[in-house]
Amino acid sequence: MPVSHSVDQEPSGATNSTENEHQNQTDNDDDRPDDGLPINELFYSLQGEGTLAGVPSVFVRTSGCNLRCWFCDSYHTSWEPTHAWMSLDEILAEIESYDADHVVLTGGEPMLHDASADLLSELDDRGYHTTVETNGTIHRDAPIDLASISPKLESSTPTPERDPDGDGEWEQRHENARLDLDALTELVETHPFQLKFVVTDADDMPEILDLLSELRDAATVPIRDENVLLMPEGATRERLAETRTRTAELAMEHGFRYTPRLHVDLWNDAPET
Ligand code: SF4
């Protein structure tokens, strides 16, 4: 399928108080259908992370993200977005070609796109269980069975020393946009959810605890420790070997859940896993 590179969009119809901070690239793809999405990958695998780890699922990975985490494990949806435009009918037909009843809409940041809400409605009508993997900065009115929210911590910021693609040009934009308490609150109030934090080391814990405290004050629903998952940072087996034991110990120390990254354990950093 054709692959083009321009993709990041302003979200419209979405709740996001940092909307003006989003990247605003012109999207001039010739093959863009009216009702479509920029798809980086669409594949069948096991859910690797979170409370549904191990469940066979179809993954729909959209391209484009409003953030630029230095450790992004889907580089070709954020730092260097590539994709082919697919209509909703084409996406649904490909999903239905697999024998699965779980669909994971991921990215990039899938909630950037208007059509993600339409896709989720279509999947809901067909009886699929849907998980949305989101950075928690955008809320849309859409049927979601599990909002898998991964708020980005200060340790994700692409400082000049950590920038994989330059000299820290994204540092301030990322820092301004990475947390949105209003969007986070709306997400946890409107969907079953899990809060999944990528942990680099113990220095991340004060920020996690502070954010949880703010969210618990703001939200009208309970946020239980069992809803909070700590996930080791690392997109390769080698890196996970460095981070997972400490992350597991921190989960035990604080009474949170630990989540593995099964797809990395099984397939390392291979695409379409
Ligand atoms: S929010 Fe997710 S997709 Fe976007 S840059 Fe960060 S890790 Fe990558």
Image: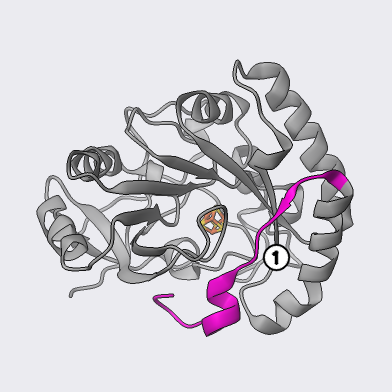
Applied colour scheme: one colour
Left or right of 58? Residue 54 is right
Residue 263 colored in magenta in the image: yes
Residue lying at 18% horizontally and 39% vertically, measured from the top left = 125
Q: Nearer the viewer, residue 228 or 80?
A: 228
Q: Nearer the viewer, residue 65 or 73?
A: 73
Residue 44 colored in magenta in the image: no
Residue 229: x and y in percent read 68, 49
Residue 36: x and y in percent read 18, 51
Left or right of 214? Residue 15 is left
Residue lying at 84% horizontally and 53% vertically, measured from the top left = 252
Q: Can residue 41 be seen from the camera position used here?
A: yes
Residue lying at 86% horizontally and 60% vertically, measured from the top left = 249
Residue 173: x and y in percent read 60, 45
Q: Quadrant of the N terminus?
A: bottom left
Look at label 1 and name its amino acid: Glu
Q: Quadrant of the C terminus?
A: bottom left
Left or right of 88? Residue 133 is right
Q: Can residue 30 be seen from the camera position used here?
A: no
Count of numbered labels shown in the rendering: 1
The picture quadrant for ligand 1 comes to bottom right
Residue lying at 54% horizontally and 29% vertically, measured from the top left = 188
Which SS class for mark 1? loop
- Residue 44, placed above or below residue 27: below
Q: Which portion, as a residue range, is magenta?
A: 254-273
Q: Residues within 10 Å of mark 1 (few under 14, many from 20)?
A: many
Q: Is mark 1 within 8 Å of ligand 1?
A: no
Residue 98: x and y in percent read 22, 68
Among the 4 quarters of the image, the one containing residue 14:
top left
- Residue 136, placed above or below residue 105: above
> Which residue is labeled 1 in the image?
233
Q: Nearer the viewer, residue 15 or 100?
A: 100
